[in-house]
Amino acid sequence: MTNDDFRMFLAALLDDDQVSAGEASTIEALLSAAQRAHWQRALLLWRCRPPGEADAWFVAAIWPDRDLKQFCQDLILTLLFGLPFENGGPAPTGSLGERAGRHFRGRFWGLAGGHPPGIPGGYYGHWAYPSER
Amino acid sequence: MLEAQIVIIGGGVAGAVMAASLAEAGYSVLVLEAGAPVRREAALEAWASVAPKTLVSPYRDRENDTYAASTDGTSDYLGNQAFKSTYLRVAGGSTWHFQGSTPRLLPSDFKMRTHFGVGVDWPIDYGTLEEFYSRAERELGVSGDSQEWNDFYGAYRSKDFPMPPIWASYSDREFTRRLGDFEIDGKPVTVRRTPQARNSQPYRNRPPCAGNSTCIPLCPIGAKYDATVHLHRAHDSGAVIVERCVASRLALSQTDVQYVELKRWENGTVRDDRARSTRGIYVLAAHAIESARLLLLSNATDRSGQIGRNLMDHPAGTIVGQAPDPWYTFRGPPVTSGIDEWRDGPFRSSSAAWKISLGNDGYGRFRSPETAVKNWLAEGLIGGGLRKKISDEGARMFRLSWGVEQLPDAANRVTLSENVDALGLRKATLSYSIDDYTRAGIADVRKKGRLLLERGAVGSIEIDSDPNAYSGSGHIMGTCRMAADASSGVVDADCQSFEYEGLFIVGSAVFPTVGTANPTLTVAALALRAAEHIQRRLAVP
């Protein structure tokens, strides 16, 4: 297992090439023993995937396996909202500030043209104008 | 034994405003708060770091939840599923997670029996409270457009709002633009900027709103008012605030309060204590449910039979849909504008008044972003398809939220449960339902809400059709009604108990009827008025 495998796997889950090695390391460090076992199984499949559309591969190769599907969806929710894993994950790690930071960096807000609840929008009244995304 | 000239039970907005007012006037004041103090930074971190983001997630504390429990949507503290609202028992009370909207009641709201033949009349009218509304707006720091609201359904204003309005959101403006000149049943629809206790400019050492979008469950910078503002002011003027201190019984004589029995909890231990007013002034400001509970626990005399009765809320709901363009609603305060036309009218003889708020937070409580994403994942979306879905639909989520008037009903009440809490005190239990008057209002707001969204070119509209489907507004009112005489209420027009000399009850508990205004400003106005009455009374040797 290499960190780059995990980074690319995360990137494919959300078709987002902005997933960094550091972010992948942070999320990987959160995995429970059970989730690490899921990742090992997913990795074997991932390395054998045919070239082509990743979205279709996930649906065909991963979704039929309930545990792997749940694992992947938890990873997506973590990328989008910075949440600790909701299903079978370990207790949240890191300081409260670090965990809050992960939440604030969630991708959902930027995609939706909003911003993460809990940090300022930058200047007073920004909400009165179209999003700057 | 704790002692002061004035003993106040409850450190929410009613108790805190009164404590600051009386302490600044030079009286010694003791505030007894059941819950713990809240540190804003810790609450924000706690909220950001937990997966289930609920109204109370920033305030979870095992010991507070044990000794100063309240309803939070998951506990069975109150044992009633029909009553949907929650409250917070910490220093500062539910203002920590309130939305911040602070409209005034309308003149007709005070005279429902006279004007519409339903409900009851208050023993005071709008004119009696107007100057205190103005004072409350300055105390809390309310932003609003005075011209827009002056004389709205007769609610005249003697003073301007202390701050200009919070800017209407982009989605509000887009929705308003698409409504254009629109009438429903011959009534022109106007989108108004909602008065709110949220700074639009620096105000009394608090910053302007920075658009953190997390007013519910807490403002991270204190731009939104919460009652700790007044707790701090009271403290700075010499008041003593005692937290983790549950009032368990009022020791009552035939005519007055002798002292308050307390359960003080900390670090897993509970000890008994007492508090006494040296001037015989006790103020019960412990929320509509807890105030009634304490009176019942104290076996208070109740000639009117009204203690605990007429529990009310503003049953609420949401109508959502997809905006025609990206309106980017996940920004700014949750509500900056609303539609208030149906807060009054002749229809109130048979159907509840209502108001609508325009949301700036996607689908709001109807469907959180996390839930929306989970639904899309369940549909099989992933990767680029999921990103596109979020980018497209996430930016077009739009909601209207409605709140409907509820009439007093003696059967809706707080009584004592046979079950006890961790302090050995009998819990409150609720009887509650909504009636046909409220159901008619719900049907009307849903019908008109759909028309509004359709006119605004909002598609994929989702409206609950169940006449009994509603949520709570967190506006917990009634249970110790104000009345003209002892036969029909618990307190008089000055919030003084009919039964016990020197006992005052403040807060939304005293509302005889509730109109459609969010209650906080009226709570503060009544507290200021009662504080003035207490000062006059204490000034007499």
Image (cartoon, rainbow, N blue to C red):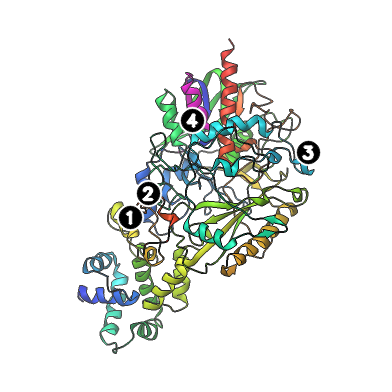
Q: What secondary structure is marked by label 4?
A: strand
Q: Tell me how far mark 3 sits from mark 4, CA to CA.
A: 39 Å
In the displayed structure image, the side of residue A15 where residue B434 appears, left or right: right
> Could you say which disc has been placed on residue A100 in the image?
1
In the displayed structure image, the side of residue B68 where residue B292 appears, left or right: right
Q: Are marks 1 and 3 in contact (CB under 8 Å)?
A: no
Tell me: residue B18, above or below residue B361. Answer: above
Residue type at numbered disc 4: Leu
Q: Tell me how far mark 2 sits from mark 4, CA to CA.
A: 25 Å
Q: Residues within 10 Å of mark 3 (few under 14, many from 20)?
A: few
Chain name for mark 1: A
Judge if badges 2 and 3 mark residues of a common chain. yes
Q: Is residue B409 visible?
A: yes
Expressed as whole percent of the image width and height from the top left, the position of residue B508 reads 60, 38
Expressed as whole percent of the image width and height from the top left, the position of residue B472 reads 59, 52
The residue lying toward the viewer, choosing from A42 and B191, is: B191
Mark 3 vs mark 4: in front? 3
* Residue in the picture at 46% in, 32% down: B230
Name the residue carrying label 2.
B44
Q: Residues within 10 Å of mark 2 (few under 14, many from 20)?
A: many
Name the residue carrying label 4.
B32
Residue at the far left: name it.
Answer: A2
Q: Residues within 10 Å of mark 1 (few under 14, many from 20)?
A: many
Residue type at numbered disc 3: Thr
